[in-house]
Image: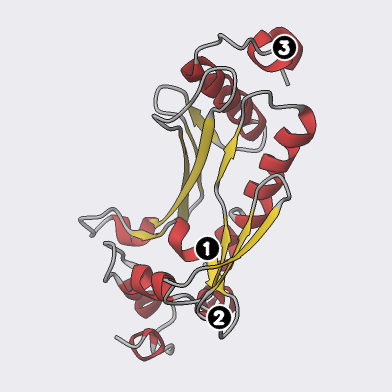
Amino acid sequence: MNWAKNPLLNNPSATAPCKDVFQAVCDELGAHYEQRGFKYSRSRPKIVYKDKEVKLEICFWSSHSNTPGQYVNLEILPNFYSLQLAKQSRIKGFLFGHTAIFNEKYTDDNRKIKVMQIFGDVLERTDADSYESVIRHNHNCNVFGLDHAKFNKIIEFIDSRILPWIDKIKTEKGTLELLENPTKARISSLSGKGTNSDFVEYVKTKFPEVDIVRLLGK
């Protein structure tokens, strides 16, 4: 890593432009994952993995609410694609994104919300207006003043919450994990109701014995 060479990471200034701090963190993540076979795009920061079956894009976004010297948001947005379906799909074989893997059912009490933060904090609250109980794995974090320990937490989040799905969606068992304890938002995204998705077509093509329409309740 180039922390010692980059003052925005090694010794951040309170006056450093937020976009420069964000870019420095993205560059560091890009360098890390390039060593693991990903390609890094710097202009619109993202890392991309591709094999014979699957493409994964992990985009890095920030926020207009950043505050110099206090807060620089890093948002981690994964998108999975089927390369087989990409050849015949208007949406490039898009399967699912963060709504499918960062949310899961929590309890039978619709008011309970549990938020798992990237740096390890856990927030639990009761929301009277909530329509379902959810565990949310927050894919945003503040990277101003980032140190090695927090950087490693970001790596751990990507490695544990995103990368395993590269192999999981190649198997029937792994793919069907998406239907275990699903939230309504997850079901909606996989069925294509809330977003454009080729997930149903992917399962029909790759695992024809699975009645995915019935499982999704379409």
Could you say which quadrant of the image residue 198 lies in? bottom left
- Could you give the CA–CA distance between mark 2 and mark 3, rounded to whole angstroms? 44 Å
Q: Quadrant of the N terminus?
A: top right
Tally the marks. 3
Secondary structure type for disc 1:
helix
Where residue 133 appears, as percent x and y from the top left, is 53, 75
Question: Which residue in the protein does label 3 denote?
Answer: 11
- The answer to whether residue 98 is above or below residue 145 is below
Residue in the image at 46% along x and 77% along y: 132
Q: Choose mark 2 or mark 3, whichever is in front.
A: 3
Query: Between 126 and 40, which is closer to the camera in this rendering?
Result: 126
- Estimate the spatial distance between the alpha carbons at disc 1 and disc 2, rounded to whole Å: 11 Å
The CA distance from mark 3 to mark 1 is 34 Å
Q: Quadrant of the C terminus?
A: bottom left
Lower sequence index among marks 3 and 1: 3
Q: Earlier in the sequence, mark 1 or mark 2?
A: 1
Q: Amino acid at mark 1?
A: Ile
Q: Residue at x 71, y 51 (%)?
A: 121
Q: What is the secondary structure assignment of the residue under circle 3?
A: loop
Say which mark, if any, is on residue 180: 2
Extreme-left residue of the structure: 90
> How busy is the neighbourhood of tag 3: few (under 14 within 10 Å), some, or many (20 plus)?
few
Q: What is the three-letter code of the residue carrying label 3?
A: Asn
The residue to which callout 1 is attached is 101
Residues 189 and 11: in front is 11
Q: Tag 2: residue type?
A: Glu
